Image (cartoon, helix red, strand yellow):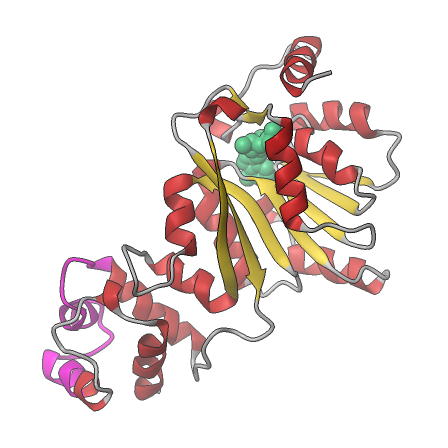
Amino acid sequence: MRLLEETKFIMKKYNLYANKSLGQNFLIDEEIVENIVDSADVSKDDLVIEIGPGLGTLTKYLLDTKAKVICIELDKRMINILNDRFSLYDNFNIINDDVLKVDLKNLISENKNNGIKKVKIVANLPYYITTPIIMKLLEEKLDIESITVMVQKEVAERLTTIPGDKETGSITYAVYYYSEPSLLFNVPNTSFIPEPEVTSSVIKLDILKEPRVKVKDEKLFFKIIKAAFMQKRKTLVNALVNGKIFNSKDECEKCLNTLNIDIKIRGEKLKIEDFAKISDYLV
Ligand code: SAM
């Protein structure tokens, strides 16, 4: 059965409507689903953690790779459907919970202790919580190889540009600190039901063995980046003084001069290495 008919059939059979507030847009395009699974480079010895499996469209293709698949889905209605659909697959596992509350570190280490070599995250993410999910996956320093996810196109651009090059946000630096990001392909809104209002993109974050730059105090490093982006339109000096990173403009300018950073620069133009230098200067 084609994916569109299959999805409509399942929704009808279970009398299910898409819950907008949970970001439910179901994939109905075989080619896109295949491309996501190919891009994630899944093999039978891997563990795949799928966030938000929904009706199981992507899940089915992931299960067919023979990898162990653990799905994490918040919507109870889907759990029934997924258990019905995949009860015959011995590589299918499901957790009914909010992904933001799941102890992924523990889940991964249990699986690694049981012989799993590589862990990959794959998802068509619920867009309303893209940022907290990506930040959780990165900041918890999980023992994972990669994150291959569908997000809103605009967000994809922000997550995968090299910070300092273009319009960026503080999350751009976090992604670049922990991973090698790439924007893989765009997905039109006609590839889903219901159709989202925006175009989507699939991105892949290959997790680096060591963070991109070495810093003495990681917490302070990210605090400085956040302060710089709290007031994007101001100069870096003003933003860092207002954000209480420095006590005065003089102090901040002295630091930037010592580090050979233009005191008129705005935060979004700064390279990740420059933020690292400012952070280490303050330690
Ligand atoms: N994977 C399916 C597909 O591609 O057709 C559905 C993707 S849909 C964009 C996002 C899914 O994430 C929905 O099934 C939704 O219920 C689930 N979801 C939303 N918030 C969640 C959360 N906090 N934790 C886990 N799953 C969540």
Q: Residue at x 79, y 57 (%)?
A: 111
Can the viewer see residue 108 in this picture?
yes
Residue 175: x and y in percent read: 46, 60
Indicate the quadrant of ligand 1 in the picture.
top right
Q: Nearer the viewer, residue 55 or 273?
A: 273
The residue stretch that appears in magenta? 230-254
Q: Give yes or no for residue 104 being in the magenta stretch.
A: no
The answer to which image quadrant residue 76 occupies is top right
Residue 53 sits above or below residue 228 on the image: above
Residue 91: x and y in percent read: 84, 42
Residue 246 sits above or below residue 67 on the image: below
Q: Residue at x 16, y 78 (%)?
A: 262
Q: Give yes or no for residue 246 being in the magenta stretch.
A: yes
The answer to which image quadrant residue 72 occupies is top right
Residue 106 sits above or below residue 215 on the image: above
- State which quarter of the image contains the C terminus: bottom left
Q: Nearer the viewer, residue 266 or 111?
A: 266
Residue 20: x and y in percent read: 47, 24
Is residue 165 rendered to the left or right of residue 159? Answer: left
